[in-house]
């Protein structure tokens, strides 16, 4: 979804989660990029370790 549409969808998603008892956590742009970088680092760690050991 384009980032420009997130502001309009926030209330819909928040209400959907509330109605179903699902935890909803909102983050800012910088924090979401930080989370993504951490995830990619974690996901690629196995590959980096395998290629380092040969």
Image: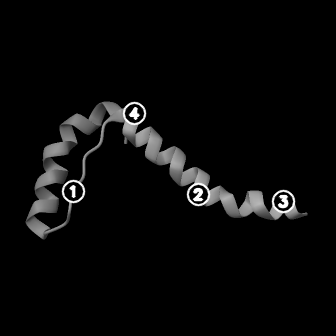
Q: Quadrant of the C terminus?
A: bottom right
Mark 1 and mark 4: span between their CA atoms? 18 Å
Q: Which residue is mark 1?
A: 24
Cα distance between the residues tagged 1 and 3: 38 Å
**Label 2: which secondary element:** helix
CA gap, disc 3 and disc 2? 15 Å
- Give SS at disc 4: helix
Please identify, in this view, whether the residue under mark 2 or under mark 1 is nearer the observer: 2
Residue 21: x, y in percent? 13, 69
Kindly identify the residue that appears in the image at 52 percent across and 53 percent down: 39
Nearest to N terminus: mark 3 or mark 2: 2
Identify whether 45 is placed above or below 28: below
Residue 51 - label: 3
x, y percentage for residue 48? 75, 57
Outermost right residue:
54
Residue nearer the viewer, 11 or 48: 48
User: Sequence-wise, which precedes: disc 1 or disc 3?
Assistant: 1
**Residue on which the image places disc 2:** 42
User: Where on the picture, by quarter, is residue 49?
Assistant: bottom right
């Amino acid at each position: 979804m384009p980032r420009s549409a997130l502001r309009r969808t926030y209330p819909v998603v928040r209400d959907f989660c509330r109605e179903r008892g699902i935890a909803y956590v909102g983050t800012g742009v910088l924090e979401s990029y930080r989370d993504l970088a951490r995830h990619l680092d974690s996901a690629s760690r196995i590959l980096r370790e395998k290629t380092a050991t040969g």
